[in-house]
Image: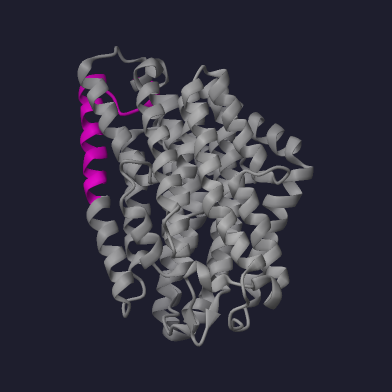
Amino acid sequence: MLDYTAMILAIGPELWLAAAGLVGVLLGAMLKDRFNGLSFKYGALALFGAAALSLLFYQGGEAFGGLVRTNTFVNFAKFVSFSVGGFALIMSEGFLRRHDTIRYEYVLLTIFASLGMGIILSAADLMTLYMGIETLSLSSYVLAAFHRDSARSSEAGLKYFVLGALASGMLLYGASLVYGFAGTTNYAGISSAAPSIGLMFGMVLMIVGLAFKVSAAPMHVWTPDVYEGAPTPVGAFFASAPKMASMVVFANVMFTAFGSVMDDWQMIIAIISGLSMLVGSFGALTQTNIKRLLGYSSIANVGYALVAVAAGQASGAGALLIFMTLYVISSLGLFAGVLAMRRRGGMVESIDEFGGLMSTRPWLAIALSILIFSIAGLPPFGGFFGKWEVFNAGLNAGLLPLAIILVVASVVSLGYYLRIVKIMWFDEPKERFEPIDGSVTLTVLISAFVAGILFLVFINQLADWANGAALGLAS
């Protein structure tokens, strides 16, 4: 018999999102086009409600015979993921309305993608993990190609689907090998299973599949194309909510299911981390399209986050939460800044078109500069402390070469981050941009304030919260 109390404690946010998605389907079927505009408020309510439930049931629980198990570590990630997802959804409405693609299906896909994020975060079993990944992935493929009249969007969706299907196949094959040699799909059972060559081979295949989902090198090739081709609000969503969820899931799987064989996977993660930092940083140097640049930037930042994973649970879990929280907030704000760049009825994506923004829109130039300084890891902005925590985690775990690569990649990244700032502040002003949606303005300002300034003052409180949440892994 189902224990409904335990089920609500364990997956209350997912139950809320599933109900919201199903009710949304019914409302869409009944109201049709009349639901299009209202659906964005409905979706934001669903996502912010899920974030609130993540805090309400923060201690977590276990349900469905151990298929799902939540704790403070994953509920911290749920709160951040659902919150930034809500802001990404709110700022999408104006963009879709101007491109005549405002449809309630966009909101429902975002809700179901968020449901997938919640499922993978709650997973304590490979079956649950795979079900959640496919829920997230299938919704994401459609979102990437949502602008059907755009060849770039259709191409992005197709690339994402083909490569994503390949990665899912590798992940599933790896999971089947792990099951075959461990005799169980439960994380706890896998952790206590006797190590074997077959188990290690399955683990490596799972790492490859998960690396694709977080866009880590060398499984990163889809990222710049999808970020560039997908509608800008979709790129904002991909770079924030699923990124946070996927990175924490990656860590959760390695720490929980394969924590007993950390010596066997630490070097693999370290190599992927180093490659991601270098490929992302050097790849971004030659980019002229701001969305492609942010795609390469995300690859580099995934590399930084993987330093914390390679450092292990004791040193890296809290550092990962701190870094990813500051990164996804900054990333969301930068994409909102891109949404603010409209001229003559179209989006402006060339970095050179940001010229003289300080003269035409000083508040936007200042906010974007704060976000850029934060994501670049420059002191005294919040992002510096996130990168510092990851750097320390690497050093404490004895990963000196990886820590050195982190410093080198961070210095290289200044080449493209500061180029944007220089263009905004010192180049000749370009033609003025069109008026900005209030939701986009709000997202840029809140992101700049939170990531760049608020956590500068309250970084110790964030660190205490994140490190306390990381202790949930040991419970």
Can the viewer see residue 452 in this picture? yes
| Colour pattern | one colour
Instruction: Residue 474 in the image: state x and y as whole percent.
Output: 55, 22
452 or 74, which is in the foreground? 452
Q: Is residue 349 above or below residue 266?
A: below
Which quadrant of the rendered structure holds the N terminus? top left
Q: Tell me what residue is drawn at x 29 percent, y 75 percent.
A: 151
**Residue at the farthest bottom position:** 344
Q: Is residue 250 above or below residue 297?
A: above
306 or 20, which is in the foreground? 306
- Which secondary structure dominates the residues rendered in magenta? helix
Label total for image = 0
Instruction: Residue 126 in the image: state x and y as whole percent.
Output: 33, 34
Q: Which residues are magenta?
A: 165-189
Residue 149 shown left or right of residue 344 in the figure:
left
**Residue at the farthest top position:** 194
* Residue 190: quarter of image: top left
Residue 106 shown left or right of residue 154 in the figure:
right
Q: Tell me what residue is drawn at x 44 percent, y 52 percent.
A: 284
* Magenta span contains residue 179: yes
Instruction: Residue 142 in the image: state x and y as whole percent.
Output: 33, 65
* Magenta span contains residue 84: no
64 or 103, which is in the foreground? 103
Instruction: Residue 214 in the image: state x and y as whole percent.
Output: 40, 44
Can the viewer see residue 23 in this picture? no
Q: Tell me what residue is drawn at x 60 percent, y 58 percent.
A: 48
Which quadrant of the rendered structure holds the C terminus? top right
Q: Tell me what residue is drawn at x 44 percent, y 75 percent.
A: 104
